[in-house]
Image: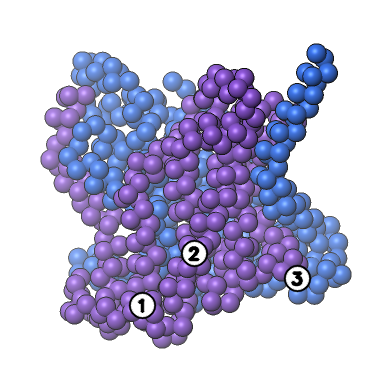
Amino acid sequence: MMARKKAMPWVSMVLLGLIGILFLSPLVWMAFSSLKTTTEVFSTNFHLLPKEPQWYNYRYVWQESEINMLQAYGNTIFITVISTVVQLFFASLAAYAFAKIHFRGKNFVFFLFLSTMMVPVEVTILPRFTLFNTIGLYNNLWAIILPHWFNATAIFMLRQFYIGLPDDLMEAAKIDGATHPVIFLRIMMPLTKAALVSLMVLSIVSCWNEYLSPLIFLVKTNLYTVSQTIRWYMLDDLQRYELVMATATSAIVPILILFIACQKYFVEGIATSGVKG
Amino acid sequence: MQRTQSRLMRRENAVGWAFVTPALITFLVLTAFPFFLSLFLSFTKWNFLSGWDHIKMIGLKNFQNMMKDKRFIQALENTFVYAATTVPISIIVSLLLAYALNGKVKGRNVLRLAFFIPYICSAVALGAVFKLLFREDGIINMILVNMHVISAPLKWMVEPSLCKVPIIMLIIYTSIGYEMIIYMAALQNVPTSLYEAATIDGAGSAQKLWYVTMPMISPTTFYLIIVRLIAVFKVFSSVNIMTMGSAVVQNTSMVNEIYDAGFVSYKFGYASAEAMVLFIIILVITLINFAGQKKWVHY
């Protein structure tokens, strides 16, 4: 180990650094382009920095435009928060039951849930559209929220976590007369906090970046999510690419902040849901 | 005594079911039911706009038509191309990056951050960025011309021989972070004693990677191949954004084709049949995963 640490030659260090810069460069280009004028973005005389930062671009996409980021943020935050909170609660309930309660049919239900790992959303979205259309959820944010309430991966990860918690904790509480709901809410769920935070950040990212469902279910412009707003500026005939880049930057910044704040949980969440035993 | 016991068991049963019910209902209504409806629709001819009474059973006709449908065949082919290119490249690159960043490298956290960020960024936002970068008058052409790699700007998004390249680059760009994190976690679990033994035997860095690391982390590689294959077969956002506004079909993917058949042409029967083909492909990959986990992975 020591030998390897010393053996890291400067060539690889420089190479790694260059690859790192290469990885960040599209994002840097995006951020700077969002502050340029339309002609500056594709000027043949390329400068990374804008001549004069056009902060107005942001004011336009956030405030003045009819299709604005403020509204899109509101919609997307609403979708993200309700989807995530309910998903984690439902998944915790099911995971606790699978790990700590002996009930008939447990294995069957578990197998059912397991089988959904093979059914991608893309396969069920057409019938889901007919279903939501029939019950009046077309052009409704709930059409995006409801499907998030079941997440097989979250259930499995939490189940593993609950299995790892000693039964003694539960038995002692049972002798004191505590019932399952009480044991679950007061004793067990708080102990899964680390797993919950990891799952929470993963869920937030996936809700925030979701595209296919909003594209299908939300047609009214006042219901647009962040992704759809980017698409709208992309399709706009005026081809104002600096505005596209301003919306793209606006979409990425909160996720970056979340990531930098919870880096540990991200990495843990991805690593534990990824690497199996 | 017997009675209290059975009463307790019944209570336990009821509580168990109560706990799984919220997830179960969501699953039944929004996953199981749509899945079987999709299976049923795949055997019908049905334009969504014509209403429920106009569903017509046509047996396997949709699947037969698919085999003659140039667009679908193209989408299928493209998706296989995306899988065959992006999966191996991204896995090799991410393994090398993870291997290089393993241990105490200066600036390890910053570099990890840089490689990981694209994975969590909105695919739509990055798709928009890549589309502009690869424009004929875009910066990539400008750099390539200035470096004399090419003599004239290339039409990346239009030329049939080139139009898959930006999408492949984008998929690789967004997947490396994820694979690298998984590899870094796996590398932590390789016992350092093995490296020490290899050092004593005079193995260099490359030899250690090939003879020690690779076999030790083969389960992870196998897992990543499966996960990435499934992800690439479902690719939609990046392709949708990057092909927007152009009539080119040379780079359409399976989900894009399902989306077009379903929500542009409203051919729900046909689109469902296409979705079933996607499901079968993913099912096969998953089954290979179950079968292979024990067989292919060796220490």
Which residue is most to the front? A176
Give amino acid for label 3. Answer: Phe
Chain given the colour blue: B
Q: What chain does mark 1 sit on?
A: A
**Which residue is labeled 2 in the image?**
A76
Quarter of the image with the C terminus of chain B is: top left
Q: Is residue A216 visible?
A: no
Dot 1 falls on a residue whose secondary structure is: helix
Query: What is the number of the mark on residue B48?
Result: 3
Look at discs 1 and 2 and give the one toward the viewer.
Answer: 2
Left or right of B243: which side holds A256? left
Q: Amino acid at mark 1?
A: Leu
- Gap between marks 2 and 3 measured at Cα: 28 Å
Q: Is mark 2 in CB contact (under 8 Å) with mark 3?
A: no
Report the front residue among B124 and A22: B124
Q: Residue at left 23%, top 55%?
A: A21
At 54% from the left and 34% from the top, the residue drawn is A186
B24 vs B49: above or below: above
Q: Residue at x 52, y 46 (%)?
A: B229
Residue B15 appearing in the image:
yes
Quadrant showing the N terminus of chain B: top right
Letter of the purple chain: A
Q: Separation of disc 1 and disc 2 at Cα?
A: 19 Å
Badge 3 and badge 1 in a common chain: no
Q: Secondary structure at mark 3?
A: helix
Residue matched to label 1: A243
Quadrant in which residue A107 is drawn:
top right
